[in-house]
Amino acid sequence: MVFWGFILQGRDETGVVQAAFDPETSSDGVQTLSCVTDNDTTTHSDPSVKQSVDLVWNAPDQCSFNDVYFR
């Protein structure tokens, strides 16, 4: 499967955006955005065809939620 673009956030079960992606360890062609908090969203930085991307999401130090949903 190939794709051109994506946008992704980690959210708890109530839909609140949680924690952040690490912009230093992501694949080429990937960038982070700060929508609610710093680096809480990741997306493509160019329209080239992609087969995969590597992302690192850092969980918060004090988790008050059980599940994380990436949407």
Image (cartoon, helix red, strand yellow):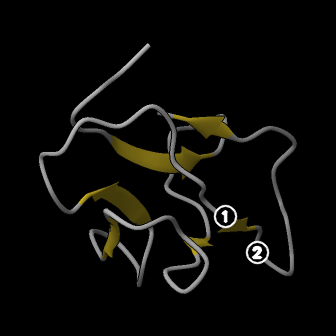
Looking at the rendered structure, which numbered label has been put on residue 12? none
Give the SS element for disc 2: loop
Count of numbered circles on the image: 2
**Nearest to the observer: residue 10 or residue 5:** 5
Q: In this view, does 41 lie to the left or right of 16?
A: left
Q: Mark 1 points at which residue?
A: 57
Compared with residue 67, is residue 9 higher up or lower down, i.e. above or below?
Answer: below
Which residue lies at the image location 57% right of the left edge and 46% below the top edge?
11
In the picture of the structure, the residue carrying the numbered disc 2 is 60
How far apart are the alpha carbons under marks 2 and 1? 10 Å
The amino acid type, in three-letter code, at marker 2 is: Pro
Image quadrant occupied by the N terminus = top left
Seen at 60% across and 55% down, the residue is 54
Measuring from the top left, give residue 25's x and y in whole percent: 61, 78
**Mark 1 crowdedness (10 Å alpha carbons): few <14, some 14-19, many ≥20:** some
Residue at the top extreme? 1
- Amino acid on which the number 1 mark rests in the picture: Trp
Q: Is residue 4 above or below residue 55?
A: above
Depicted 3 relative to depicted 14: above or below: above
27 relative to 5, above or below: below
Disc 2 or disc 1, which is closer to the eye? Answer: 1
* 63 to the left or right of 53: right
